[in-house]
Image: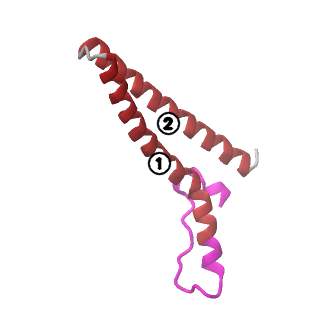
Amino acid sequence: MDQFTDLTRKVRWYLFTVTLGVSLMLIGVWWLESAVLKLASWEQAVSLLVIGVCLSMLLAVSASNYVMEPMRLLWQAIVHVSPDYQGTPPPICNRHGWAASC
């Protein structure tokens, strides 16, 4: 398996698990609101909408940082070897298990 296929598999698995986690959290909040707190359906809808939007924003930031890490490492490596930027350190590639692809 080449590095790009391995990276694609890791990103796909990461996005799947994060999306599954957010979905399970929303289901848990819905159950808590309906069974334990006994909220009205419009209150449940509003709270689930607000929580869903907040979790989606958090998911977008988290996932984009994780997915763009290889691009940041590539950018840092290019800047490191360019003659215009003398003080840029080399990239550290052994975070997140990406040492083989650096």
Please name the amino acid that badge 1 sits on: Ser
Residue at mark 2 to residue at mark 1: CA–CA distance:
9 Å
Q: What residue is rendered at 46% in x and 31% in y?
A: 21
Q: Which residue is mark 1?
A: 62
Q: Badge 2 local density, few (<14 within 10 Å), some, or many (20+)?
A: some
Q: Nearer the viewer, residue 39 or 18?
A: 39
Where residue 71 sits in the image (x, y, percent)?
62, 61
Q: What residue is rendered at 39% in x and 40% in y?
A: 54
| 27 on left or right of 98 | left
| 23 on left or right of 9 | left
Where residue 86 sits in the image (x, y, percent)?
56, 86
What range of the chain is rendered magenta?
77-102
Q: Does residue 69 belong to the magenta stretch?
A: no
**Res 73 → quadrant:** bottom right
* Element on which disc 2 rests: helix
Q: Which residue is mark 2?
A: 18
Q: What residue is rendered at 65% in x and 74% in y?
A: 78
| 62 on left or right of 83 | left
Please name the amino acid that badge 2 sits on: Val
Do the residues under discs 2 and 1 have CB atoms within 8 angstroms? yes
Quarter of the image with the N terminus is top right
Q: Nearer the viewer, residue 5 or 49?
A: 49
Q: What residue is rendered at 23% in x and 17% in y?
A: 37
Q: Nearer the viewer, residue 35 or 8?
A: 35
